[in-house]
Image (cartoon, rainbow, N blue to C red):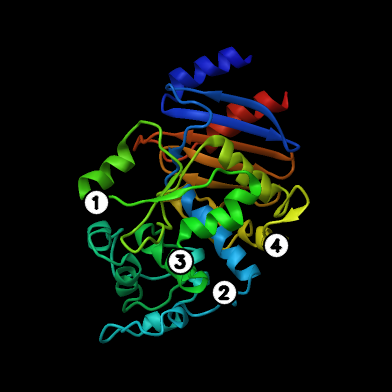
C-alpha cells in the first residue's frame, strides 16, 4: 500500500479522520489530511485532553506547586464547605482523580448540573465522595475531572490555558492557545459535534478554568509534538520540560479498565496499550489518539471530528498505520 492507496482507504473506511502525523526517531515520516482540513487546523480532541492535563499536573509537581499526588484534594480547597453527612471526600487524593479511582455521588457524568453552574470546580466537589467510600474501583469520569484543573488554577494563580502555553505548548512549538467559553447550552453542544476545523482554543468554565476531561483543540502535528515529548522522557531540544520520573509514572499501569474499555490498562490519565513494550496512548472519543511506541521510537497522532460510534483507533493504528511506516 502506497500513500495514495492509504489515503483512499482512510477516506472510505475511516471517514471522520481529519489528520494523521507520524514521527519516527523524532522526524516526520508521514502526514496527510482529509475532509478539507489543513495541516495547521485544530480539532476538538475530546478525552485526549485528559492526558495533556496529566502532563500539566506533572509540571506543577516539578515546580513544587503541588507537593504530591498523595495530597488530599481538600487540602487545596480550605474554604470549601463539605456537604452535611459527607465523609468520604476527606480521604480522596489527587492520585484517585488521576487514576479514575475517585468515587462520585452520581451514576454517569453530571453534565447539566456542572456545566450550568458558575464554578465547575466547586460543583464537581459537591459530587465527589459518597456513601460507598473509597473502593479504588475504576470509574471513568469526564466532567468532574474539572477538579484537577481547579487545583492547577489554585496553585499557579493562572488559567489552565495560560499555564499550558507557558510551560508546555510554547516550549515544544505548539501554537499559543486561548480560552473559549460557551455562553449557551446550544453553543456548548455545537462545539462538541460541529465537524468544522477549530481554532487554537481550550474550552473553559465561567471562571476561566480549562476543562480537564475534554475541550482542548489541537492539530495532529501538535499532538505529535506532545507525543514526542513523552517519548523523549520530557526533553525537547535539550530542554527539560517535564521530569522523566513523571513520564515513567503516567505510563505505569494503575488498574484494569474493564470490558467497556476493551480491558485496557490505565495509567495516570493515559491508556496503557502494551505494558511490556511501553506502548501507551492518549485516547479521545471519535478516534482522537496520541500513540507512543517506545520500542520503535514512534509517535502516531490522529485527529477526528465527532462521530459517536467511534471510540478509539488503536486497532487501525496498529493494523494499518504502523506497518505502513515501518515497512
Q: CA distance from mark 1 to mark 3?
A: 23 Å
Q: CA distance from mark 4 to mark 3?
A: 19 Å
Q: Residue at x 57, y 47 (%)?
A: 281
| Mark 4, other Cα within 10 Å: few <14 / some 14–19 / many ≥20 | some
Q: Does dot 2 land on a helix, a strand or a loop?
A: loop
Q: CA distance from mark 4 to mark 2?
A: 14 Å
Whether tag 4 and tag 3 are in contact, CB under 8 A, the answer is no
Q: Does dot 1 land on a helix, a strand or a loop?
A: loop
Q: CA distance from mark 2 to mark 3?
A: 11 Å
Quadrant placement of the C terminus: top right
- Among numbered discs 1 and 3, the one appearing first in the sequence: 3
Q: Residue at x 45, y 21 (%)?
A: 13
Quadrant placement of the N terminus: top right
Q: Residue at x 41, y 28 (%)?
A: 16
Which residue in the protein does label 3 denote?
Answer: 148
| Residue sitting at the far right | 238
Q: Is residue 267 visible?
A: no
- Among numbered discs 4 and 3, the one appearing first in the sequence: 3
Which residue in the protein does label 4 denote?
Answer: 243
- Among numbered discs 2 and 3, the one appearing first in the sequence: 2
Q: Residue at x 50, y 57 (%)?
A: 162
Q: Nearer the viewer, mark 1 or mark 4?
A: 1
Q: Nearer the viewer, residue 169 or 291?
A: 169
How many tags in the picture? Answer: 4
Q: CA distance from mark 1 to mark 4?
A: 38 Å
Asked if 279 appears above or below 103 in the picture, the reply is above
What numbered label is drawn on residue 66?
A: 2
Which residue in the protein does label 1 denote?
Answer: 183
Whether tag 2 and tag 3 are in contact, CB under 8 A, the answer is no
Residue 165 lies left or right of residue 87; in this view the side is: right
Whether tag 1 and tag 3 are in contact, CB under 8 A, the answer is no
Amino acid at each position: 500500500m502506497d500513500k495514495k492507496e492509504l489515503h483512499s482507504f482512510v477516506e472510505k473506511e475511516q471517514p471522520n479522520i481529519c489528520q494523521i502525523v507520524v514521527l519516527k526517531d523524532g522526524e516526520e515520516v508521514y502526514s496527510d489530511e482529509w475532509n478539507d482540513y489543513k495541516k495547521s487546523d485544530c480539532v476538538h480532541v475530546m478525552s485526549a485532553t485528559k492526558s495533556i492535563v496529566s502532563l500539566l499536573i506533572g509540571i506543577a509537581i516539578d515546580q513544587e506547586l503541588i507537593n504530591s499526588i498523595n495530597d488530599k484534594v481538600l487540602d487545596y480547597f480550605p474554604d470549601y464547605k463539605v456537604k452535611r453527612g459527607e465523609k468520604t471526600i476527606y480521604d480522596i487524593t489527587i492520585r484517585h482523580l488521576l487514576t479514575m479511582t475517585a468515587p462520585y455521588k452520581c451514576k454517569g457524568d453530571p453534565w447539566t448540573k456542572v456545566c450550568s453552574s458558575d464554578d465547575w470546580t466547586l460543583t464537581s466537589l459537591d459530587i465527589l465522595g459518597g456513601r460507598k467510600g473509597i473502593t479504588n474501583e475504576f470509574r471513568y469520569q469526564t466532567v468532574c475531572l474539572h477538579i484537577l484543573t481547579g487545583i492547577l488554577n489554585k496553585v499557579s494563580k493562572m488559567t489552565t490555558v495560560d499555564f499550558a502555553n507557558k510551560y508546555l505548548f510554547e516550549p515544544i512549538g505548539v501554537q499559543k492557545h486561548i480560552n473559549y467559553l460557551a455562553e449557551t447550552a446550544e453553543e456548548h453542544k455545537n462545539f462538541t459535534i460541529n465537524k468544522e476545523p477549530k481554532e487554537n482554543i481550550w474550552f473553559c468554565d465561567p471562571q476561566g478554568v480549562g476543562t480537564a476531561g475534554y475541550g482542548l483543540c489541537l492539530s495532529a502535528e501538535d499532538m505529535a509534538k506532545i507525543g514526542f515529548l513523552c517519548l523523549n522522557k520530557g526533553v525537547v531540544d535539550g530542554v527539560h520540560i517535564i521530569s522523566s520520573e513523571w513520564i515513567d509514572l503516567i505510563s505505569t499501569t494503575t488498574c484494569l479498565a474493564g470490558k467497556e474499555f476493551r480491558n485496557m490498562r490505565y495509567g495516570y490519565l493515559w491508556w496503557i496499550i502494551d505494558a511490556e513494550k511501553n506502548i501507551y496512548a492518549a485516547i479521545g472519543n471519535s478516534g482522537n489518539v496520541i500513540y507512543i511506541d517506545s520500542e520503535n521510537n514512534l509517535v502516531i497522532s490522529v485527529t477526528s471530528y465527532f462521530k459517536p460510534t467511534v471510540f478509539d483507533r488503536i486497532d487501525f493504528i496498529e493494523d494499518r498505520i504502523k506497518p505502513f511506516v515501518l515497512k
